[in-house]
Image (cartoon, rainbow, N blue to C red):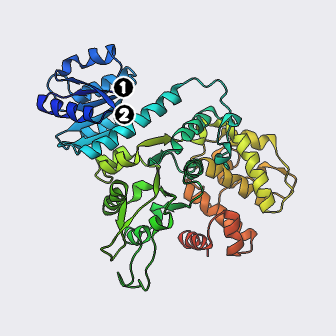
């Protein structure tokens, strides 16, 4: 039985909620009207889930949340409040609340939130257990993490965590800087899940203009707008039965967020220009490199959508926090790109390894990959040498004062521009071959060529 404590200063709400929860047949329920006794009861008894009112005299719900966080009390919290207050909601999120619901409470939604909180609690307990043999070989589904090269303990713990919740059908939110491998983790979740033999559809939400995204995401019917000459399936239908990965979820416009929320809650959607609802059998995995708490505060991201996506959450560390992986990754990319580029480069010079280890990698693993790829294209010998490294990298590591066209690249876009330029030179401007080397579509390459004015 799951042990629940309900803290609210309204006796009528306590009585109603207690009866409702007991009738479900899977909860033990304790109620508390006097919030001043909350600290004492949370310290003296063990509960799985806390249902917490925010607006209470003397000791508020936020006070209790801060106390729980400060004292590392192992309990999942669902906030129930009668006041729509964005700042309060954000503070509650930062304190670790798993859901935030407005009164009057929708009973079905509450049960969904309780089930998600119960599952998350189980995962937290597993994550907190001491791992006697934490290694890649100790994973049950190590084949699912194909393409993720690491020996870092933080990453291996994330893999263990992924293995536990991947078998559910819950939504997942992956946090991490650009280039940390969010899509690779999403693919691992898909492979482990029961949907693993179905389609995995990856979409960069930031790559579409908002007016086009609705049509691409939900599909459209013939004649729904100028140029819609046939019916078209959207990303959701393409991923039917499988997994839809939405990268850069923070870039979605508010109207699209509303529609996505409907997909998550009602499991249905409408094509653009149609009044016929279509059932959506799809698992949503979202990723962001933005601070969604700040986006909610600014009014750019919906709080209810955040909680629907954040049922299970992963935060990927940047490469600078995985320094032990840098040499391992460098040799992995050396093997990968020497074959692609038909080079005989067999090793990396010690001076290059030292330089690679000294860099902070604002572009993370993707930037390291581009550095090695770029260097292999230039290198003519059997050892990857310092002189083959990108000029911007040498400048940043204080080894060379050389510049590109008199300017030192200062951000990841400039890194990408230089790398694409070098690959185009290497392929003699053959865009098909260049796209293969870069690992992107020819259409995407042409768009980047226009963006960076490389023609």
Residue 109: % across, % down: 29, 46
The quadrant of the picture occupied by the C terminus is bottom right
Instruction: State yes or no: discs 1 and 2 in contact (Cβ < 8 Å).
Output: yes
State the image coordinates of residue 208 (x, y, percent, origin top left).
Answer: 45, 67
Would residue 304 be found to the left or right of residue 350 on screen? left
Graded by Cα atoms within 10 Å as few (under 14), some (14 to 19) or many (20 or more), the crowding at tag 1 reads some
Residue 8 appears anywhere in the view: yes
Rendered position, 179 above or below 137:
below
Judge from the rendering whether residue 55 lies leftward or rightward of residue 361; answer left or right.
left
- The residue that appears at 53% across and 51% down in the rendered structure is 178
At x 12%, y 28%, the residue is: 11
For residue 363, the mark is none
Q: Earlier in the sequence, mark 1 or mark 2?
A: 1
Mark number, residue 96: 2
Position in image of residue 429 (x %, y %): 70, 75
Quadrant in which residue 358 is drawn: top right
Distance between the alpha carbons at the discs numbered 1 and 2: 7 Å
Please name whichever residue, 341 or 171, is drawn nearer the observer in this view of the structure. 171
According to the picture, the residue beneath numbered tag 1 turns out to be: 69
């Amino acid at each position: 039985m799951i042990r629940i404590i309900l803290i609210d200063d309204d006796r009528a709400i306590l009585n109603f909620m207690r009866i409702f929860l007991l009738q479900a047949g899977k909860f033990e329920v304790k109620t508390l009207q006097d919030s001043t006794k909350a600290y004492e009861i949370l310290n003296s008894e063990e509960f799985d889930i806390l249902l917490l009112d925010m607006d209470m005299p003397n000791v508020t719900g936020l006070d209790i949340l801060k106390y729980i966080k400060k004292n590392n009390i192992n309990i999942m919290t669902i906030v129930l409040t009668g006041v729509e207050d964005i700042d309060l909601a954000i503070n509650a999120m930062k304190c670790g609340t798993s859901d935030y619901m407005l009164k009057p409470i929708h009973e079905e939604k509450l049960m969904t939130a309780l089930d998600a909180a119960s599952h998350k609690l189980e995962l937290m307990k597993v994550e907190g257990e001491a791992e006697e043999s934490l290694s890649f070989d100790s994973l049950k589904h190590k084949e699912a993490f194909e393409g993720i090269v690491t020996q870092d303990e933080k990453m291996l713990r994330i893999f263990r965590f992924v293995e536990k919740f991947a078998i559910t059908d819950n939504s997942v939110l992956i946090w991490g800087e650009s280039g940390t491998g969010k899509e690779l983790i999403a693919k691992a979740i898909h492979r482990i899940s029961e949907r693993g033999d179905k389609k995995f559809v990856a979409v960069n939400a930031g790559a579409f203009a908002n007016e086009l995204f609705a049509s691409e995401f939900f599909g459209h019917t013939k004649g729904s707008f100028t140029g819609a000459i046939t019916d078209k399936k959207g990303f959701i239908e393409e991923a039917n039965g499988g997994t839809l990965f939405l990268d850069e979820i923070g870039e979605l416009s508010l109207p699209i967020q509303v529609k996505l929320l409907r997909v998550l809650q009602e499991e249905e959607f409408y094509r653009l220009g149609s009044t016929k609802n279509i059932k959506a059998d799809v698992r949503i995995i979202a990723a962001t490199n933005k601070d969604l708490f700040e986006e909610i505060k600014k009014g750019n991201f919906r709080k209810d959508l955040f909680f629907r996506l954040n049922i299970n959450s992963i935060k990927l560390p940047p490469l600078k926090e995985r320094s032990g992986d840098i040499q391992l990754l460098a040799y992995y990319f050396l093997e990968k790109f020497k074959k692609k580029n038909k080079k005989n480069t067999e090793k990396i010079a010690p001076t290059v390894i030292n330089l690679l280890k000294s860099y902070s990698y604002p572009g993370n693993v993707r930037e390291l990959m581009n550095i090695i790829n770029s260097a292999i294209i230039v290198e003519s010998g059997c050892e990857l040498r310092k002189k083959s490294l990108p000029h911007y990298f040498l400048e940043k590591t204080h080894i060379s004062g050389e510049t590109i066209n008199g300017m030192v690249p200062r951000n990841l876009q400039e890194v990408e521009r230089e790398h694409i330029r070098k690959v185009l030179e290497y392929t003699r401007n053959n865009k098909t071959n260049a796209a293969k080397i870069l690992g992107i579509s020819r259409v995407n390459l042409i768009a980047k060529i226009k963006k960076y004015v490389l023609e």
